Image: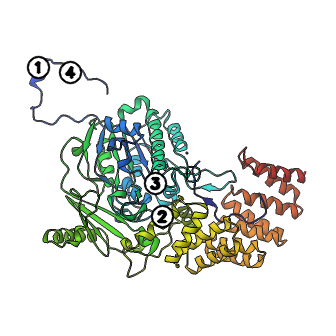
């Protein structure tokens, strides 16, 4: 722990730290009272409790119950055998927040407003949490990653909403946490609970980076991805086992929020395209009223989860775009209907055209500058674009579905649905930084006209996704970033990331130029200013660095890292009292920003306030983990103050 400027971000992403038998009494007079043979069997009693598990980024076709022979998913496979598996379930968007908002409200994205990560859901939309809470359920949610942070609106209706991410050994807030920790919290909450309850558990393991890309560099990404699905499966099984005897009257729903692409259609990762590679999801129901061992082939959407859950819990439905799937669960064919999905990430992140899609029967159309049409019954991998054939049948199908897509949503975001990643009094720029650290670009402008078709930029987008996923590190990362910037020199987010990578290599002058380029490209937030100030301070231009940080403070006045760096620089200029004031402001915003507290102790000591300095050093020792490598340095400081 040194007196050099605090690292650029206050939080970083990166690698993760891991029925009873019924007796049929054939009494003669009962037969006379029996219903006619063709009457439907009476539905079992409604479920008492609800357990919802969402597994981020899990492809359906990488689960054993969906036919994947290499899968290690015994818990999910058991749930499928004991319940109903939906073979053709689809997300409403290949985006974490957007998809979860649809799953929890039963509404398509235009109906809930969370059109991209970082865009809060509208506060007047009923959710599964609000409705069940009002019906007397105890409610709790335990989420594993920042895209579902409470500031984005999903917390409403939950008595407990656990979204607090862990800190690294030096106190920095992480952007995700291991499924083991999430499930431990959920089990502790469920234990001893007598009232009807609803618990939602979100697991993030399959999301990139998969495992440790540095340590496991020799293993293919897909193999590491399967490892992480196996981890999520194990934690799901642990959660279900913890129900014990309560499992008999508990409805369990497991869903993935979207899939993941490994080169299909030229895509790496997810969020850009709306092919079924990233829209098809796993969806399993198990519990009272759900037949065992059934596979439902009807196309369904995650917006159908809420209406179905309400029915299985014996409750009246709420206003939703989805339908109650109980007839399908009971074996009826699905009704003729259309399903909508979208991705506005191309627009928000790159200024490219958004993509919207409607499927109906055999047809699926994608609304784009060059529309696409697929016969998904004959061509489930969407390899043959029938829009280019222009037969009467394809022209009619395409025109009809594109018209339906326009009825759901136009190609512009309404002002109310444009990204505003702060919310709830939190820093917008902090949210952008944390989403960026998880691989979400968050850097485009939503008002660009004449937008490119994402299909024409798929090669560039794939290379950007490899960078943002965390799968490329070290020298290869620098090479990739330089290659991207040769093709897309105005990409401010890539300039920002290259600046970060160059600081790690000690190439300060070149890094400084990259942060300046990021500012010229109008990358939002304080990050480019912090990076530029770091470089300026490194070569002794303290006054210039301080001016840069003061500018960052004006645009993002609640950023503790900006304030902490101002304090560090003021201390280096000999202004210890001014430094202490800035550092105290930073700690009011983030009490566990350990670099700020260490520098505050130093500033107080230099100002002659030995008692205050000792107090801060003792507080820092109390907050640091026992094995933190910074403890000896703090202990030496404390000894010198006694």
* Secondary structure found at label 2: helix
Q: Characterize the local packing of mark 4: few (<14), some (14-19) or many (20 or more) Cα atoms within 10 angstroms.
A: few
Q: Which mark is residue 24?
A: 4
State the CA–CA distance, disc 4 to disc 2. Answer: 59 Å
Q: Is residue 558 among the parts visible in the rendering?
A: no
Q: Position of residue 154 (x, y in %)?
A: 45, 56
Q: Nearer the viewer, residue 558 or 71?
A: 71
Q: Earlier in the sequence, mark 1 or mark 2?
A: 1
Q: Nearer the viewer, residue 164 or 455?
A: 455
State the CA–CA distance, disc 1 to disc 2. Answer: 70 Å
For the residues carrying marks 1 and 2, which lies nearer the camera in this image? 2
Name the residue that disc number 2 marks: 465
Residue at horizontal 73 percent and vertical 66 percent from the top = 5
Name the residue that disc number 1 marks: 29
State the CA–CA distance, disc 3 to disc 4. Answer: 46 Å
State the CA–CA distance, disc 3 to disc 2. Answer: 32 Å
Q: Is residue 639 among the parts visible in the rendering?
A: yes
Q: Earlier in the sequence, mark 3 or mark 2?
A: 3
Q: Earlier in the sequence, mark 3 or mark 4?
A: 4
Is there a contact, CB below 8 Å, between mark 1 and mark 2? no
Name the residue that disc number 3 marks: 156
Q: Characterize the local packing of mark 2: few (<14), some (14-19) or many (20 or more) Cα atoms within 10 angstroms.
A: many
Q: Position of residue 140 (x, y in %)?
A: 47, 45
For the residues carrying marks 3 and 2, which lies nearer the camera in this image? 2
Q: Position of residue 289 (x, y in %)?
A: 28, 37
* Secondary structure found at label 1: helix
State the CA–CA distance, disc 4 to disc 1. Answer: 14 Å
* Left or right of 402, for residue 156: right
């Amino acid at each position: 722990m040194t007196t050099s400027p605090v690292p650029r971000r206050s939080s970083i992403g990166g690698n993760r730290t891991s029925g009873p038998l019924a007796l049929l009494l054939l009494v003669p007079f009962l037969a006379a009272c029996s219903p006619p043979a063709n009457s439907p069997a009476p539905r079992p009693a409604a479920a008492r409790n609800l357990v919802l598990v969402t597994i981020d980024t899990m492809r359906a076709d990488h689960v054993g119950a969906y036919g994947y022979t290499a899968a290690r998913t015994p818990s999910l496979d058991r749930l499928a055998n004991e319940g109903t598996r939906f073979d053709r379930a689809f997300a409403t968007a290949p985006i974490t927040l957007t998809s979860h908002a649809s799953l929890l409200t039963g509404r398509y994205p235009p109906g809930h407003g969370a059109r991209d990560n970082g865009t809060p859901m509208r506060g007047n939309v009923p959710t599964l949490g609000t409705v069940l809470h009002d019906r007397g359920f105890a409610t709790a949610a335990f989420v594993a990653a920042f895209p579902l942070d409470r500031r984005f609106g999903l917390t409403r209706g939950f008595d407990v909403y656990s979204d607090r991410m862990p800190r690294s050994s030096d106190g920095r807030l992480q952007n995700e946490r291991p499924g083991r920790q999430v499930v431990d919290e959920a089990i502790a909450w469920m234990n001893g609970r007598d009232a009807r309850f609803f618990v939602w558990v979100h697991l993030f393991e399959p999301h990139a980076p998969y495992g440790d890309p540095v340590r496991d560099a020799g293993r293919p990404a897909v193999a590491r991805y399967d490892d992480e699905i196996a981890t999520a499966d194990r934690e799901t099984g642990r959660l279900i086992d913890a129900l014990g005897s309560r499992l008999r009257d508990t409805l369990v729903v497991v869903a993935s929020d979207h899939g993941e692409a490994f080169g299909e259609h030229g895509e790496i990762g997810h969020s850009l395209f709306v092919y079924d590679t990233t829209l098809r999801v796993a969806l399993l129901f198990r519990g009272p009223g759900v037949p065992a061992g059934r596979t439902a082939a009807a196309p369904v959407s995650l917006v159908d989860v809420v209406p179905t859950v309400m029915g299985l819990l014996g409750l009246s439905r709420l206003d939703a775009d989805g339908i109650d799937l109980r007839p399908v669960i009971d074996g009826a064919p699905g009704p003729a209907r259309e399903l909508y999905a979208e991705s506005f990430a191309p627009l928000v992140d790159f200024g490219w055209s958004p993509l919207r899609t409607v499927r109906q029967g055999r047809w699926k159309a994608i609304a784009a500058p060059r529309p696409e049409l697929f016969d998904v019954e004959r061509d489930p991998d969407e390899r043959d674009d029938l829009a280019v054939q222009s037969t009467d049948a394809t022209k009619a199908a395409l025109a009809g579905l594109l018209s339906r897509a326009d009825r759901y949503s136009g190609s512009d975001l309404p002002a109310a649905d444009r990204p505003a990643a702060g919310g709830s009094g939190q820093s917008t720029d902090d949210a952008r930084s944390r989403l960026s650290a998880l691989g979400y670009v968050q850097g485009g402008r939503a008002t660009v006209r004449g937008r490119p078709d994402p299909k024409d930029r798929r090669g560039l987008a794939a290379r950007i996704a490899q960078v943002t996923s965390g799968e490329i590190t070290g020298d290869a990362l620098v090479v990739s970033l330089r290659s991207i910037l040769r093709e897309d020199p105005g990409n401010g987010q890539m300039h920002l990331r290259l600046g970060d990578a160059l600081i790690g290599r000690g190439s300060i002058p070149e890094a400084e130029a990259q942060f300046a380029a990021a500012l010229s490209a109008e990358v939002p937030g304080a990050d480019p200013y912090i990076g530029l100030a770091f470089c300026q301070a490194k070569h002794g231009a303290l006054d210039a660095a301080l001016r840069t940080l003061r500018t960052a403070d004006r645009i993002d006045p609640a950023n503790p890292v900006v304030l902490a760096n101002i304090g560090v620089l003021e201390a280096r200029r000999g202004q210890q009292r001014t430094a202490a004031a800035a550092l105290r402001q930073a700690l009011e915003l983030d009490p566990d920003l350990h670099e700020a507290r260490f520098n505050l102790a130093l500033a107080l000591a230099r100002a002659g306030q030995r008692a205050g300095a000792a107090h801060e050093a003792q507080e820092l020792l109390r907050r640091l983990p026992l094995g933190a490598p910074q403890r000896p340095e703090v202990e030496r400081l404390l000894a010198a103050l006694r």
